[in-house]
Image (cartoon, rainbow, N blue to C red):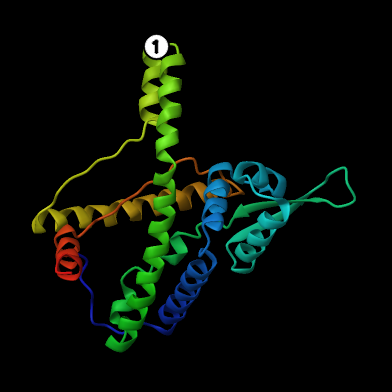
């Protein structure tokens, strides 16, 4: 686990933390409807979408889709641009603000604040976690029909090595599960922090090399550490006694 130094936060660090907390709260408030979560998933996957594009993919009407887009836009989650169209009005194109997920991460600096402030921040962070896991749940909800589609694709593709390798690496749902003891958890957490640092360096380097950071995000990398002992204890203490 990272060591939290006792040195005080600078005013700049405190202001940055306040900004992160504000963004986090706005994300939680905006994502209290399933349709808004699905809109974000579609915009990540397809980079940009018009209202009509989203209506077709969501199976929702224009007024309904527009209403929820306005909520997400007001919360600061979306970017927009206009595209010329044949009608009297230009077409509005939506995308998710770059790095919106990264901007909600608190890191560890907030643990240097006074304890009463930490409790309040952690309370809000739990609400944010619940909403983030709701997004993940929506992805998993779509896996059953997706696996049915995968089965169809597998039966139809030309079975050569190249096609099968691409199917396994890019279409197949790959996951890795391990059960960790305390020492293994410490080791893993340290390496994962190194990975996040390296990923951020890679992103910054790529950002410097090109003008736009707006790209399709066709993959979701899920790193979830579940404290299964505590979860089970909470379950039998709260539910099983009843």
Question: Which residue is at a point 56% across and 46% down the rendered structure image?
Answer: 42
Residue 123 drawn at (x, y percent): 34, 77
Q: In this rendering, is residue 27 above or below 39?
A: below
Residue 192 drawn at (x, y percent): 26, 53
The quadrant the C terminus occupies is: bottom left
Q: In this rendering, is residue 39 above or below 159?
A: below
The quadrant the N terminus occupies is: bottom left
Question: Which residue is at a point 38% across and 18% down the rendered structure image?
Answer: 164
**Identity of the residue furthest to the front in this view:** 242
Left or right, 120 with reference to 208? left
Question: Which residue is at a point 10% across and 59% down the rendered structure image?
Answer: 182
Q: How many callouts does the rendering have? A: 1
- Residue 78 falls in which quadrant of the image? bottom right
Residue 50 drawn at (x, y percent): 70, 47
Q: Is residue 220 visible?
A: no
Looking at this view, is 9 or 60 the one in front? 60
């Amino acid at each position: 686990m990272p060591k939290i130094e006792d040195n005080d936060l600078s005013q700049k660090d405190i202001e940055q933390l306040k900004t992160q907390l504000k963004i986090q709260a706005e994300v939680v408030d905006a994502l209290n409807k399933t349709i808004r979560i699905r809109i974000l998933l579609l915009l990540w996957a397809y980079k940009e979408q018009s209202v009509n594009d989203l209506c077709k993919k969501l199976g929702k009407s224009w007024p309904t889709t527009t209403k929820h887009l306005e909520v997400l836009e007001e919360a600061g989650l979306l970017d927009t641009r206009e595209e010329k169209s044949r009608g009297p009005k230009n077409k509005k194109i939506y995308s998710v603000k770059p790095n919106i997920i990264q901007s909600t991460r608190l890191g560890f600096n907030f643990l240097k604040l006074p304890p009463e402030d930490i409790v309040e921040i952690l309370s809000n962070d739990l609400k944010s976690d619940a909403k983030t896991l709701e997004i993940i749940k929506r992805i998993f909800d779509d896996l059953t029909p997706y696996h049915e589609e995968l089965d169809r694709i597998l039966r139809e593709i030309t079975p050569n090595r190249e096609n099968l390798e691409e199917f396994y690496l890019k279409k197949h749902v790959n996951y890795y599960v391990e059960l960790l003891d305390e020492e293994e958890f410490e080791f893993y957490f340290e390496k994962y922090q190194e990975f996040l640092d390296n990923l951020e360096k890679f992103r910054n380097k790529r950002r410097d090399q090109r003008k736009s950071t707006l790209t399709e995000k066709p993959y979701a990398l899920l790193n979830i550490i579940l404290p299964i002992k505590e979860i089970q204890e909470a379950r039998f203490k709260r539910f099983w006694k009843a």
